[in-house]
Image (cartoon, rainbow, N blue to C red):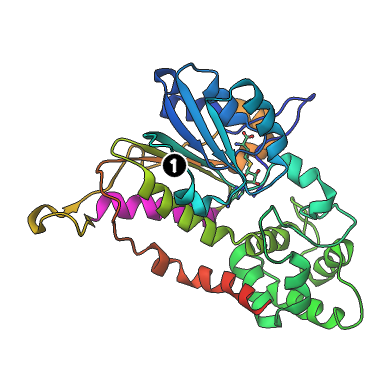
Amino acid sequence: MIATIIPNKKKHYSVLLDEIISIITPQYGGTFIDCTFGQGGYSKKILEFSNTKVISLDRDKDSEKIASEIKKKLKNRFIFNNKKFSEIDTIDLRNEKIKGIIFDLGYSYTQIKNLEKGLSFNSKGELDMRMGLNKFSAKDAICKLDQKDLENIFRYFGDEKDYKKIAYKITKDRKVKNIDIPTLVKIIYSSKKKKYYKVHAATKVFQALRIFVNKEITELIYGLINATKILKKNGIIVVVSFHSLEDKIVKYFFKSLSENKSVSRYMPKEQEKKNLFKVMSKKPIIPSDKEIKENISSRSAKLRFATKQENFNDFETDILNKFKYLIDIENYSKKL
Ligand SMILES: C[S@@+](CC[C@H](N)C(=O)[O-])C[C@H]1O[C@@H](n2cnc3c(N)ncnc32)[C@H](O)[C@@H]1O
């Protein structure tokens, strides 16, 4: 997963912005939830259209600075919450009918460039990787988890081939030295069978640790479930994802609730089964060649969206069971 915004001569890019605007149609007004405010790229664009309101969220408190600038100008049309999007159902919606909910997953360029966050393998400091509102850091995981747990994190969250050797070396080396970022990068290099890579050799392990530290799988699943609960009929959920695990979850969630009938306990027996979502396009929308040329980080982006067809919120989904094997790995955090 790569940052979705990169600066080009002081300019920030928000991935698939035009496509998102054409899907959620803010030109006709309405209230939108931006679940991943970041640098405010999507929120600002929506607010350019009159008769729109944006309720935004970000787990990173640093986003609050940009949000407060917008708030100064557009007091009645913009709200920022320093919250995780899994808690979207706890925000004050002020009786607003939500027209669209947007997720732009991952982390921003600003976050990766902030060396204190320890997200980048180019940092020289301690392993951290917390995006905000976290309970433990990557250092806690590296220092305290069993070899087998580390293996599973690297294997399932990073698709790292040399997961066994890397986990073995970490647990051996941590007995005698501090594992900071440069040390971990050295361990990864020395564990690799293949020595030359198109991308940095540490990319997969760093992605895996970041997913684990920020509980990104659990966040995404509960984010989707709770967003669906607060959405009314005709509301849209749009998700931009950056790696195959995320896309698999989003695709399954929309597909299962659009092809399998959903149940509401509050409906009479005969009517109770309905398809909750309509998926407009089976294939994900991807950035154009032009966008990829301007912002190489956008190349792995995939956008999926679905419209809620019914007003009930009490729906059944098997998504927690389907991805239990991944949630169980994130739950190793209970040992920390
Ligand atoms: C890719 S950036 C969003 C960029 C934004 N769309 C823009 O155009 O400026 C992702 C943001 O989502 C935030 N984030 C990631 N996971 C989150 C979660 N579970 N809850 C709330 N915010 C989250 C990160 O802190 C980061 O600021």
**Would you place residue 5 above or below residue 28 in this image?**
below
Query: How many residues crowd mark 1 within 10 Å: few (<14), some (14–19), many (20+)?
Result: many
Q: Amino acid at mark 1?
A: Arg
For disc 1, does the CB lie below 8 Å from ligand 1? no
Q: Observer-nearest residue: 283 or 208?
A: 208
**Seen in the image, is 172 located left or right of residue 335?**
right
Q: Quadrant of residue 184?
A: bottom right
Residue 315 drawn at (x, y percent): 29, 56
Single out the residue that lies furthest toward the top: 50
The image shows residue 305 at horizontal and vertical percentages of 41, 40
From which residue to which does the magenta span run?
244-260
Evaluate whether residue 39 shows in this view: yes
Where ligand 1 lies, by quadrant? top right
Element on which disc 1 rests: strand
Q: Where in the figure is residue 23, as x and y percent of width and height?
A: 42, 29
Q: Answer whether residue 16 is visible to the viewer in this image.
A: no
In the image, taking residue 221 as reference, residue 259 lies left or right, namely: left
Q: Main secondary structure of the magenta part?
A: helix
Q: In this figure, which residue is indicated by the disc labeled 1?
A: 304
Q: Is residue 69 left or right of residue 230?
A: right
Residue at image position (85%, 78%) is 174
Give above or below for 104 relative to 156: above
The residue nearer to you, when weighing 124 against 226, is 226
- Quarter of the image for residue 10 reads top right
Looking at the rendered image, the quarter that the C terminus falls into is: bottom right
Q: Residue 1, position in %: x, y?
A: 64, 50
Q: Is the residue 274 above or below the residue 69 in the image? A: below
Picture residue at 74% right of the left edge, 65% below the top: 138
Tell whether position 59 is magenta. Answer: no
* Magenta run includes residue 255: yes
